Amino acid sequence: MKLGTVTIRGEDRLACLLDEEGGILAPRAMGDLVSIIEQGDAGLQALTAACDSALAERFRLVDGVVRTPISRFRRNVLCTGWNYWDHFYESAGKREGQEVPKPIAPTFFTKSPDAIIDPCAAISLDEAVSEKWDYEAEIVLVIGKTGRSIPRERAHEHVFGYCLANDVSQRDLQRRHGGQWFKGKSIDAASPIGPWITLARDVDLSAVTLECELNGELMQHASASEMAFGIDELIAELSWGMTIHAGDMLLTGTPSGIGNARTPPVFLRDGDEVIVRATGLGELRNRVVATDLHSYRVGD
């Protein structure tokens, strides 16, 4: 079962994807996907029943726009760094004096919700803000149940499902701001997430292959089984003494093949097309578009 958000006739609607043609729109009274997740099994059962109803409202993908599945964030988007060892090692000597020893536990950081865009939206790029825009294919874990200090053996109870992200990063900003990653991962309108959340019960991560393609060239290719720290360990470590909430999203790290680690480096440019895909999770297909992000703007 795949769940998400579509805009149909100018209105954002919670939706169940049935096939490549389209699916079912949930009743408006059910709210958004976060509302369903927060209700736990009861919310998912109600949504399933509504989608199975003979009175269910169908939609066609060609008639709408697929949005990022979750757009109502209660906090920053949670992220994991260095979760594929080949990625950690490929950047050795290329961190511009900010080298670190191999981590013994997961590395966590966050990114601003304002960075998040729809699965087919344009990736905003402003070379006045950064000259080193890099792609990062990632699998996103969606938290299904609120909890704190969750033991590894119960971590699976807190997984709602999975989708994809391109954790577009600005490498020079990472270096400029002391090697921490928040600023260099949070530039507005640069990181697509989606397209649909596939329920955890329908995903065998050991069989998932993650890829990134840039202008038709395969740049990243890895099995999710190569993660340095598995989903159970990520949840246990992140929640240790810290509450994680239903509806939170956790990016689980990128494999090797990033542009900054290549010789010569490969960075995103205006007009590039980036595709992130994974077995059973669909794909993100985004065009990179030059955008003015450095001009002064009063908040909306």
Image (cartoon, rainbow, N blue to C red):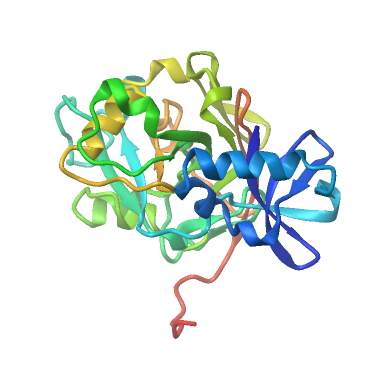
Q: Position of residue 80 (x, y in %)?
A: 32, 37
Q: Is residue 10 above or below residue 250?
A: below
Residue drawn at 18 percent across, 37 percent down: 240
Give x and y (percent) for residue 298: 44, 85
Task: Please state which of residues 80 and 297 is positioned toward the viewer in this rendering.
Answer: 80
Q: Residue at x 41, y 64 (%)?
A: 129
Which of 171 and 18 lies nearest the eye of the viewer? 18
Indicate the position of residue 249 as horizontal and vertical percent values.
42, 45
Judge from the rendering whether residue 112 lies leftward or rightward of residue 66; answer left or right: left
In which quarter of the view is residue 64 placed?
Answer: bottom right
Q: Position of residue 86 (x, y in %)?
A: 35, 20
Looking at the picture, does residue 222 appear above or below residue 238?
above
Compared to residue 115, the image places residue 3 above or below, namely: above
Q: Is residue 90 visible?
A: no
Q: Residue at x 58, y 44 (%)?
A: 194
In which quadrant of the rendered view does residue 232 lie? top left
**From this viewpoint, is residue 7 visible?**
yes
Image position of 62 with respect to 13: above or below: above
Left or right side of 223 for 90:
left
